[in-house]
Amino acid sequence: MFAKENGLQEDPRLKAISEAIRVVPHFPKPGIMFQDITTLLLNHHAFKDTVDIFVDRYRDMDISVVAGVEARGFIFGPSIALSIGAKFVPLRKPKKLPGEVIYEAYELEYGTDCLEMHVGAVQPGERVLIIDDIVATGGTLSAAIRLLERVGAEVVECACVIGLPELKEQCGLNGKPLYVLVEPRQMPIDNCCRGPVARSYNGAV
């Protein structure tokens, strides 16, 4: 669900968050409208509003783990975790974690990738929020859900700053609800630039 359809219809923070996100046409390839959140991070008011909206939503949901998807989930996840009294667990790309790991593979447009988590980082029965910056197809978040459920965790919800409008017609990911703050920004440029929104070709979808 989108925040504006869940009690925040007139909240000016959502407009400020959206306007703080820069759109970079033709990156990383022609036709892609890249949603650059680095400009959001430069605006401390918009950055704080982003975290505050998530904190307001999750502070009373008895969440004990915030799991951040590499890499931009690491930007928002720790602040949310600290504010709601949860621990932060990074879900990383292969060979980035030094200890024993459990992993979950997922499909990309060309090939596969996987997410890894330290064994023992999440205990059976813990209630988990998964956080990332953007969701397009949902493949990465679905892999994160599967990974956490394999260790017996209860995934309460997935949350992203940006989500495609088509997600309005979807109930969730692997049966889990999805909470999104804003839709991708567009630019009034030629149609060749109106391609799908992608974060990068680092394996996230």
Image (cartoon, helix red, strand yellow):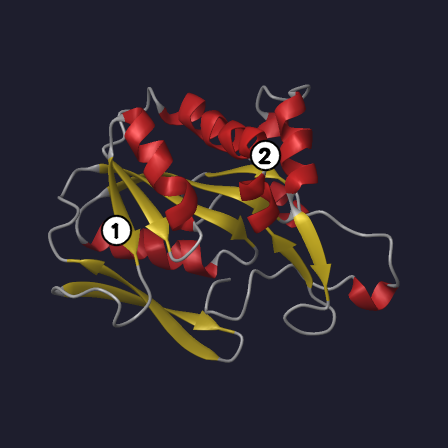
Tell me the kind of residue under disc 1: Leu
User: What residue is at 37 percent from the left and 41 percent from the top?
Assistant: 77
**113 or 25: which is nearer to us?**
25
In the drawing, what numbered circle is on residue 27?
A: none
Closer to the N terminus: mark 2 or mark 1? 2
- Asked if residue 174 shows in the view, the reply is no
Other-residue count near label 1 (Cα within 10 Å), few / some / many at <14 / 14–19 / ≥20: many
In the drawing, what numbered circle is on residue 2?
A: 2
Q: How many marks?
A: 2
Q: Quadrant of residue 177?
A: top left
Task: Find residue 137 and report its horizontal and vertical position in percent.
Answer: 55, 58
Task: Find residue 43 and report its horizontal and vertical position in percent.
Answer: 59, 36
Q: Quadrant of residue 31?
A: bottom right
Other-residue count near label 2 (Cα within 10 Å), few / some / many at <14 / 14–19 / ≥20: many
Q: Is residue 132 above or below residue 66?
A: below
Dot 2 falls on a residue whose secondary structure is loop
For the residues marked 2 and 1, what is the alpha-carbon distance in whole angstroms?
A: 24 Å
In the drawing, what numbered circle is on residue 148?
A: 1
Please state if 92 lies on the left or on the right of 170 as rendered: left
Tell me the kind of residue under disc 2: Phe
User: What residue is at 61 percent from the left and 21 percent from the top?
Assistant: 8
